[in-house]
Amino acid sequence: MKKLIVYYSMEGNSHFIAGKMAEKISADTLRLVPQKAYVDKGFAKFIWGGKSAVMAEKPKLMPYSVDFSLYDEIIIGFPIWASTITPPIRTFVCDNLNELKKKKISVYACQAGNGAEKAMAKLQALLGIDEFKATAVFIDPKTRPSEKNEKILDEFCNKIQGFFESDFARVDFIEKDNVVFHTWKKEAHFDDYRAPVTASLELLRAHKDSIFIVDARNGFEDTKEDVEWGFNYFLPEMKKTGCKLWGFILPEFSRIEGEIDLWTAEIEKNFRVIRGTSYDEVFKLASDCYEQ
Ligand SMILES: Cc1cc2nc3c(=O)[nH]c(=O)nc-3n(C[C@H](O)[C@H](O)[C@H](O)COP(=O)(O)O)c2cc1C
C-alpha cells in the first residue's frame, strides 16, 4: 500500500515539505488548489485568508481525483492561518471524511510563529479520530530554512515509516519476532545518542511486551551525562513498557567490557539480560527464556 500527501500551500512552504517528504518516504502528492485564488500579497492576504479561516469556510477546489483504495496512510499538510486549519483542507476533509476515517493519518503544519497545536486539535475533531500517527510543525521551512526544520522532517518521516535512522543508529520493529531492534552504527553522544534511544522507547511503548535487542558492536555509551540520562530516564520509562528481555549483540570479548558491565548491572535490576554474538543467537536465547 502507498502513502499520499495531501496539502495546500499559498506561499510554498507546505509545498516544499511535501516535495521533500515525497522523496524520503516514496509517497504520492496531491496539491489542493481553490477555484477562487486567495489574495497572496501584502496585508490583504492576512485579512482575506484570516477571515476565511476564522469563518471555517469550505472553498470549492479545482477538480482532483484520488483512488483511496491505493493508500493506507494519508499525510495532511497545510499552513496555519489565524491559528486554525486552512480552508481548502477543510473542504477536502469534509468531502472525503468516510474514506479518511479508514486510513492512518499524519499531519504537518507550517507556521510563522504559533497556532499549530490548536489547528491540529481542530483537524482531529473534524476527522473524528483519536490520534494522529505522527505530527510535525515547521517554522517557514522554505523561506527560513534551518537545521531544526530538517531534523523535524527526518523524525516525522521516521515515525511515519515506523523506523528511526540517523548517521549514528537505526531502530526497527521486527514484527515476526516481536523485537525492537536497535543498531548502533557508531559511537554517539548527547542528542545523537538520545534521539535513537527515544525512538526505541517509543517503539517499545507501541509494542507492549516486545523484546529489546541492541547491536552494540559498533558503539556503546560512556559519556557521563548520557549514562545518567539512561539510568534516570530511559530505564525507568522502559520498565513501564512491559519489556522484560534485553539482548545485546557483542563480540565475544569487547574492548569496552567495563561499560558493558556497568550497564548490565543496572539493567539486570529490572530486566533479564541476554548476550550473544549475532541477532539470531540473541533472539534464540530470548525465545528460550519465554518458553521456560
Ligand atoms: C492568512 C494568513 C494567516 C496566518 N496566520 C498565522 C498564524 O496564526 N500563526 C502563524 O504562526 N503563522 C500564520 N501565518 C503564516 C503562515 O502560516 C506561514 O508563513 C506558513 O509557513 C505559510 O505556509 P505556505 O507557504 O505553505 O502557505 C499566516 C499566513 C496567512 C497568509
Image (cartoon, rainbow, N blue to C red):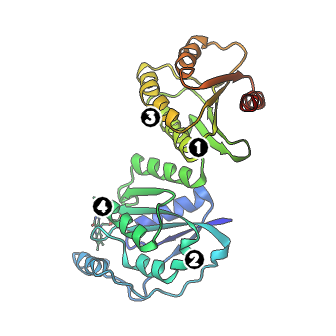
Q: Are marks 3 and 4 in contact (CB under 8 Å)?
A: no
- Report which residue position mark 2 lands on: 99
Residue 225: percent from left, percent from top:
40, 23
Quadrant in which ligand 1 is drawn? bottom left
Q: How many marks?
A: 4
Distance between mark 1 and mark 3 Cα atoms? 25 Å
Name the side, left or right, on which 273 lies relative to 124. right
Mark 3 neighbour density, 10 Å: few (under 14) some (14–19) many (20 or more): few
The quarter of the picture where residue 29 lies is: bottom right
Mark 4 neighbour density, 10 Å: few (under 14) some (14–19) many (20 or more): some
Q: Nearer the viewer, mark 2 or mark 1?
A: 1
> 181 or 220: nearer the eye?
181
- Report which residue position mark 1 lands on: 208
Q: Which mark is residue 69?
A: none
- Specify which label sits upstream in the sequence, 2 or 3: 2
Is 140 placed above or below 94 here?
A: above
Callout 2 secondary element: helix
Is 2 placed above or below 204 here?
A: below
- Specify which label sits upstream in the sequence, 4 or 2: 2
Q: Nearer the viewer, mark 2 or mark 3?
A: 2
Residue 210: percent from left, percent from top:
63, 39
Is 149 placed above or below 56 here?
A: above
Give the amino acid type for the residue marked by disc 3 in the picture. Asp
Give the amino acid type for the residue marked by disc 4 in the picture. Ala
- Specify which label sits upstream in the sequence, 1 or 4: 4
Distance between mark 1 and mark 4 Cα atoms? 38 Å
- Report which residue position mark 3 lands on: 191
